[in-house]
């Protein structure tokens, strides 16, 4: 992460309380509730309309199935599921590697149909239910939450080079599930897990990549699965760790230079594993090399940098000016690019 987002005040955060109540107080307590089947009266009155006023297939049907299955589960399995609700929603601690998450595959080991029904519930909650009037009249629209979070900042916080749509656009960029909802239950509406990112980071690179496990497959079979630390998108660390980019050239700069003629290194002392995860998820090194080999970057060198050199500015003075506002307009990458060219010369 080049730069984290700051939390904003929003009613949209409170949808997670509805989720927690439904699963912790009702579904995962099913064996201890006298009712033989799920009934809307088991839910707090303030939440009942959220279930009743959307299509039954979105929330009511999967919840009914989950309740019936949980009636048959052991105390040990119910405890595991409850712990999963709590731990999966502590996104910061999961990114730090301090907690072990519960995945859909773990729930399938308990009961395969339960895993399927929980996934249906959380997919429908995010894709359908939150866009219905009964939800947005109470919690606000997801589009408004996005616009208030992004504000006027156009730079993608993941890669630092591409753009996201801002509050003045009629559309929005992706809200990425940082811990992918295909792997991790109970988190599809957690705002700590919803990250505005550019379309390149979201739909071209990250996709459904597992954020906190590096999974290696051969012939579509998992051969290794390694726990990894990741940057937390809403980190409150101050100052936020500086990430330096280092570019090394193996040939003189020319307008036909290619990524194979350069090497990129990402540096942030104490955050090496997080940097590896960042690169794995978003193809950071590949994107930076591609940008440095672009026509636009070459023209920047020829028309802006060299013009200032010809007017008597030194390389150190030019880079210092960029460093003063290093996150603006890819300046951090331009610094690495210009230093790489100078060091080769």
Image (cartoon, grey):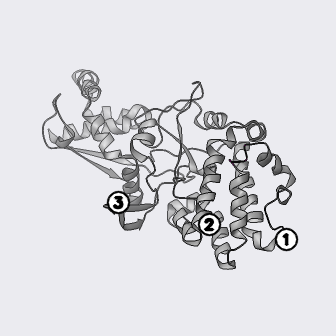
Task: Left or right? Give the position of 81 relative to 317.
Answer: right
- The reply to whether discs 2 and 3 touch (Cβ–Cβ < 8 Å) is no
Q: Which residue is drawn at 53% across and 32% down?
A: 153
Give the magenta part as a residue range.
Answer: 54-58
Q: Residue at x 50, y 65 (%)?
A: 97
The Cα atoms of the two marked residues, 3 and 1, are separated by 45 Å
The Cα atoms of the two marked residues, 2 and 3, are separated by 27 Å
* Sequence-first tag of 2 and 3: 2
Residue indicated by mark 3: 220
Which element carries disc 2, helix, strand or loop?
helix
Q: Name the mark nearer the viewer: 2 or 1.
A: 1
Residue 300 part of the magenta-drawn span: no
Residue 27 occupies which quadrant of the picture?
bottom right
Residue indicated by mark 2: 84
Q: What percent of the width, then of the height, locates residue 167?
A: 60, 28
Which element carries disc 3, helix, strand or loop?
loop
Residue 199, above or below 100: above
Depth check: give the residue in front, 18 or 75. Answer: 75
- Disc 2 crowd rating (10 Å Cα; few below 14, some 14-19, many 20+) is many
Residue 39 occupies which quadrant of the picture?
bottom right
Task: Left or right? Give the position of 227 relative to 184.
Answer: left
Depth check: give the residue in front, 212 or 252. Answer: 212
Residue 143, above or below 221: above
Q: What percent of the width, then of the height, locates residue 131?
A: 68, 37
Q: Which quadrant does the C terminus fall into? A: top left
Which element carries disc 1, helix, strand or loop?
loop
Q: Which residue is drawn at 77% across and 48% down?
A: 51
Q: What percent of the width, then of the height, locates residue 266?
A: 33, 50
Depth check: give the residue in front, 277 or 43. Answer: 43
* Sequence-first tag of 3 and 1: 1
């Amino acid at each position: 992460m080049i730069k984290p987002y700051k939390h904003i005040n929003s009613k949209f955060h409170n949808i997670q309380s509805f989720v927690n109540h439904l699963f912790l107080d009702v579904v995962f307590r099913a064996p201890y509730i006298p009712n033989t089947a799920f009934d809307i009266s088991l839910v707090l009155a303030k939440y009942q309309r959220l279930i009743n006023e959307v299509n039954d297939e979105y929330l009511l049907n999967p919840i009914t199935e989950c309740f019936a299955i949980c009636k048959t589960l052991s105390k040990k399995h119910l405890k595991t599921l409850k712990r999963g609700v709590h731990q999966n929603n502590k996104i910061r601690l999961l990114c730090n590697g301090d907690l072990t998450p519960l995945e859909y595959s773990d729930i399938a080991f308990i009961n395969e149909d339960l895993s399927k029904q929980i996934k249906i519930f959380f997919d429908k909650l995010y894709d359908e239910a939150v866009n219905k009037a009964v939800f947005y009249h109470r919690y606000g629209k997801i589009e408004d939450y996005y616009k208030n979070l992004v504000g006027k900042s156009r730079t993608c916080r993941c890669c630092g080079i591409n753009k996201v749509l801002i509050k003045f656009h009629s559309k929005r960029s992706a809200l990425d599930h940082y811990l992918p909802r295909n792997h991790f239950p109970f988190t599809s509406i957690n705002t700590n897990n919803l990250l505005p990112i550019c379309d390149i980071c979201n739909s071209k690179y990250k996709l459904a990549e597992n954020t906190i496990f590096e999974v290696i497959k051969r012939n579509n079979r998992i051969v290794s699965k390694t726990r990894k630390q990741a940057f937390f998108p809403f980190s409150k660390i101050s100052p936020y760790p500086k990430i330096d980019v280092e570019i090394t050239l193996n040939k003189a700069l020319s307008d036909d230079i290619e990524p194979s003629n350069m090497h990129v290194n990402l540096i942030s002392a104490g955050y090496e594993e997080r940097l590896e995860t960042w690169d794995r998820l978003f193809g950071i090194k590949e994107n930076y090399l591609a940008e440095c080999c672009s026509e636009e970057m070459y023209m920047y060198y020829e028309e802006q940098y060299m013009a200032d050199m010809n007017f008597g500015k030194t390389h150190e003075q030019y880079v210092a000016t960029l460093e003063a506002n290093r996150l603006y307009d890819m300046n951090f990458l331009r610094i690495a690019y210009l230093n790489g060219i100078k060091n080769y010369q």
